Amino acid sequence: MMRLHLVKTLVIVAVVLAMWEAIVRFGVASQIILAAPSDIVLAAVKDGGVFLRAFATTMIEIGAAILLASTLGIVVGVVVGSSHTLAAATAPFLSSIFAIPLIVLYPLLMAWLGIGPLSKIVFGVLSGFFPIALNTIDGVRAIEQRYFVFARSIGATSLQTYARIVFPMALPAVVSGLRVGTGLVVIGVVVTEMLASLGGIGFLISYHRTLFDTGHVYFGMMLALTMAVAVNIGITWLDRRLALWRMLEQAEG
Amino acid sequence: MPIIEVSKLAKDFNAGRAVLRALADVSFSVEEGRFVTLVGPSGCGKSTLLQILAGLIGATSGQVLIEGKRISAPMPDKIGMVFQDPTLLPWKTALANVEFPLDLRGVDRTLRRSRCSALLDLVGLSEFADHYPHELSGGMRQRVAIARGLAQDPRLILMDEPFAALDEQTRTRMGHELLDIWQKTGKTVFFITHSLTEAIYLSDVVLVMSPRPGRIIETIAIDFPRPRELDMIGSEAFGRIRNRIWHLIAEAQV
Amino acid sequence: MVNDGGGQDPAMGAALAGYLTFAVVLLGGWELTAQLALVDRDLLPPLSEVCAILWRFLHDPRFISDLGLTAGEVAIAFLIAAPLAISTGFLLGERLHLAETFNPVVHFVLAVPQSIFLPVFILAFGIGFFEKVLFGITHAYFVILLNSFAAVRSIPRPLVAAARVFGATRAQIYTRIYLPAMLPLILTGLRLGMILCIIGVLLAEMYASRRGIGRLIFTWGEGYQVPELLAGIVLVSVLTITVNEAMRLAELHVSRFYARASTA
C-alpha cells in the first residue's frame, strides 16, 4: 500500500520535473527567468562546495540571531508583561517601533559594523526581537491574578513564581511569537546578505544574479527556502515537545 | 492559646479619590482544632478578611495573631489555603500539583511523594494521581486543591468559598467529605461562605458578618453532635438557627 | 467628563506617558551621548546635527523628488493591491469552494518569505519603476487578502438570515451588515499591507535602483555618510510611524463606532 503511494508521488514529481525542463528548453519560458531543473543540478554539482560553505555561514548567523532574539525577547516580554503599568506604558511604544521598516536600519549597521556576519546577526536579532517580545508580553498578561495569589500563598519566591508558574503558562504565546520571530530572522539575514555581504547564501544568490547564472540563482534560492522551512520545522518540534500547552488549551474548559 | 486572634481589625482601600472601608472593628478568636465559618452577604469583606489572615494583604489598623505571632507575610508552613477556584497548574498531574509547594521548598523527593500520595488517598483520589486537571471534574479538582493545602502540614486551613463554583449535589457531598478529612487530620479550619446552610452544617462556630463595612455582628455556637448527618439540615433546630442568622444579616443591612 | 469609556482612560494615560518617556529617553539619550562624545562622533552624530541635515534635505528639490518617487511607488502599489486583495478575499469568503482550492496556495505563499525572491524578481522583471511597484504589490496583496477573507468569514450568519427575513434588499445587506462587520479586520489588513508594501518597495530600491529614498539611504550607508544616513532613517521612521498610527486610529475609531452601533 505504502509502496504504491510512494511510486505515485515519485511519478508525479518526475512528470512535473520533465514538464518544467521542457518549458525552459523549448523556449516557452526564458532561460534567464526560469532555470531548468538540469541547470540547477549543474550548478549544484559545479559549485556545491561553495554553496555548502555559504549555507553554513548563513545558518550560523541565523542560529546566533535566533538565540539572542529569543532570549532578549522572552526576558523583556516576561519582565514587561508582569507589571500592568509597565506593560501599558511599553507595549504601544514597542508596536509602534515595529511599524518601522527595519531594512532601513541596515545601512546604519553596515556603517557601524561592516558587511561581515556581525551586521547580519544584529539585524536578525532586531527583526526577531519585536514579535517575540510582544507575544510574550501578551502571554504573561493573560495569566490570571489568582495564580499569582496562589504562588504567594504557598510562599514561592519571585524567581520560583516566574520560572515554575508564569513561564510555563505563557508558553503558547511565547511559541507563536517564536514562530513569527524566527521567520523574520531568516528573512532578515538572507535579505541583508543579498544587499551587501562578504559571504553567505544571500550573497551568492545576488552574485550569480549579476552574472545571469540563473541555475545558480535558483539553487541558492532553494537552499534559502530550505533554511526557512528547517527553522519552521524546528519551531514545530519545539511546540510538540512542549506538549503541555495542549493541556493548557483544554484545562480551563 | 487560640490559634487565631483578631482584635479591632480595620481595612481601608483606596479607590481613586474615595476611601473604601472594607472592614471596621472586627474582633474574634478561633480555638485550635475547631471548624469555624464566617458567613455574610456578598461584598461584606469576607474575602478581604481571609486575605489578611493569610498574610496576603496588610491591615489598616488592629491586630492579627496567628499562633500567637503577628502576621505580615504568608506563612505557608503554618497556614494552608484553598481558594474558590482550585488554581491547579494545568501541565502537572494531580499528584504533582499536590507536591508542588513541597517541591518549591526543596523537600526530598521520596518523602514528598509518600506524603502527597497519602494526602490524595485522604481526599479519595489515589486512583487519579496521574490524571491532569482537565481530566478531572470540578469537585475532584477542588479535592486536589484541598490535598495541596494540606501538603505543608499546616495547623490552620483557610478556605475561601471553596465549593461556591460547584453544583448543589457535589457541594453537599464535598462538605460532608471535608468534615471527614477535618476529623481525620485534626486541623483548624476557617471557612468562608455565603451559604447559611453550609455554614451551620459544617461548623462548630459561625461568625456572622454585617454588610460593608464588615464587622462581626454575632458569634453563634453550633451544638449539633458530630459526626453531622445530612438530614439534620431539614430539622426544626437547624431551621431556627438559619432564620436567626438570616434576620441578623437582614437587619444589619438597614 | 462623561465616564462612558472611563475604564480606558487610565490605560491610555499610562500608554501616553510611556510613549513620551521612551521617546524622550531615546532621543535625549542620543543627543546627550553624541554631545558628550561618549561614542565616536563619526559613528553617532548628535540628533541636533541630524535634524539640521534633514531640514536641509527637505528644502532640496532633488531629495524631495526622490522622496516623492518612493512615496509614489508605495502609494500606487498599495492602491492597486488593496482593491484587488479585498475583492479576491471577499469572493473567496463568499464562495468557499473556491477558497478550498486556493487556500493551500495562499498559505504556501505566505509561509514562504517573499522578500527572498527579490533577485529572481529582478531577473524576471528588471529594475524599473513598475517593477518596484509590482514587488510592493506582491508584498501587500497576500496579507490584505487573508484579512479580507477572515473579515467575510467573521460576519455573523444569523444576522444575515435575520435581515433577509425582514426583507432587506441585497444592497442593504451589503451596506448595513457586511460593511460594518468587515471593516475592522479589513482595516487591520490594510495597515499590515501598507507596512509590508513599504518594506517591499524600500528593499527593491536598496537592492537595485538608481533613485528613491531606499537607494539614497543605502548609498549613504556604503559611503559611511552617517549623518545623512541617520537623517534618512529618522525621516522614514517618522513617516511610517505616522502612517501606521493614523491607520490604527482609524481601525480603533471604526471598531468602536460600529460596536456601539451594533449594540444599539
Image (cartoon, rainbow, N blue to C red):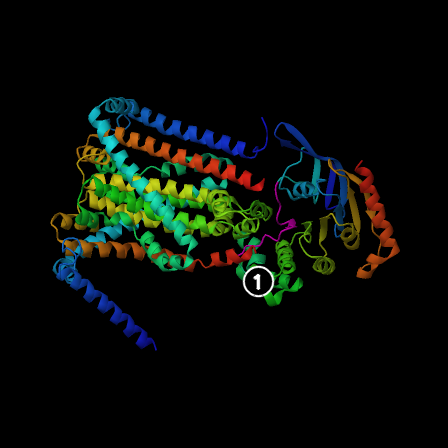
Category of crowding for the residue at label 1, using alpha-carbon neighbours closer than 10 angstroms: few (below 14), some (14–19), many (at least 20): some
In the image, B70 versus A22, the foreground residue is A22
Q: Position of residue B114 (x, y in %)?
A: 59, 63
Which residue is drawn at the image coordinates 45% and 42% (left, top)? C183
Q: Which subunit holds the residue at mark 1?
A: B
From the image, which quarter does the C terminus of chain A lie in?
bottom right
In the image, C87 versus A226, the foreground residue is C87
Q: Quadrant of residue A31?
A: bottom left
Taking the image as shown, residue A50 lies to the left or right of residue B209, namely: left
Q: Position of residue B125 (x, y in %)?
A: 63, 64
In the image, B144 versus A49, the foreground residue is A49
Q: Position of residue C106 (x, y in %)?
A: 34, 54
Taking the image as shown, residue A138 lies to the left or right of residue C118, namely: right
Q: Quadrant of residue B225?
A: bottom right
Residue B84 part of the magenta-drawn span? yes
Q: Amino acid at mark 1?
A: Glu
Q: Which residue is mark 1?
A: B135
Q: Position of residue A102 (x, y in %)?
A: 30, 39
- Label 1 element class: helix
Q: Is residue A171 visible?
A: no
Image height of B110 relative to B156, above or below: below
Q: Magenta-highlighted stretch: main secondary structure?
A: loop
Start and end of the magenta stretch? B73-90
